[in-house]
Amino acid sequence: MDKRVAVLILVLVFSLATLSCSNEALPPLEGEPAELAAEFVDDLAGGNYEECTRYFNLRMKRTLSARKLEQAWIDLLEQTGPYESQSDMREESVDGYLAVTINAQFGKDTAKIRIVFDESRHISGLWFKPDRKKAAGE
């Protein structure tokens, strides 16, 4: 009898956890990842950090607030100078995710902005990588 109660409790807990996760699911974003990546960078450059977070999946929303994103962008600008433009972009599949890497031109340097999208086309990863060779004067 105790085993049945324990199993029933485990099933109930699992069911509740599954339901609570499914309630948090975000609807897929409209558009192709390359288009979404370009829009995201435009929003970053325009200082629309709150708007940028609408591209994030739930984990990114919990990890990277608009304020933290703003600080990361400011840190990048301090290294590279003011943002000027996006140039070419490259897409690649990595472990079920689609990564878009954008080459961006800044006042003093270039940088790669890597944006990883999940299956619902929400951002699940973001990296800024300044061009170290150019910064080092090579």
Image: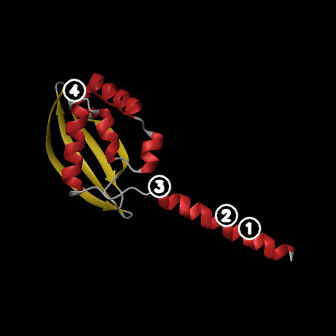
The amino acid at mark 4 is Gly
Residue 9 numbered mark, or none: 1
Secondary structure of residue under mark 4:
loop
Residue 100, x across and y down, in percent: 26, 52
Q: Residues within 10 Å of mark 1 (few under 14, many from 20)?
A: few
Residue 40 numbered mark, or none: none
Q: Disc 3 and disc 4: Cα gap in Å?
A: 47 Å
Mark sitting earlier along the chain (3/2): 2
Q: Which residue is mark 2?
A: 13
The amino acid at mark 3 is Glu
Q: Which residue is mark 3?
A: 24
Q: Disc 1 and disc 2: Cα gap in Å?
A: 6 Å
Choose top left, top right, bottom left or bottom right for residue 33: bottom left
Mark sitting earlier along the chain (2/4): 2
- How many discs appear? 4
Residue 137 numbered mark, or none: 4
Q: State left or right for residue 121 relative to residue 35.
A: right
Above or below 19: residue 122? above
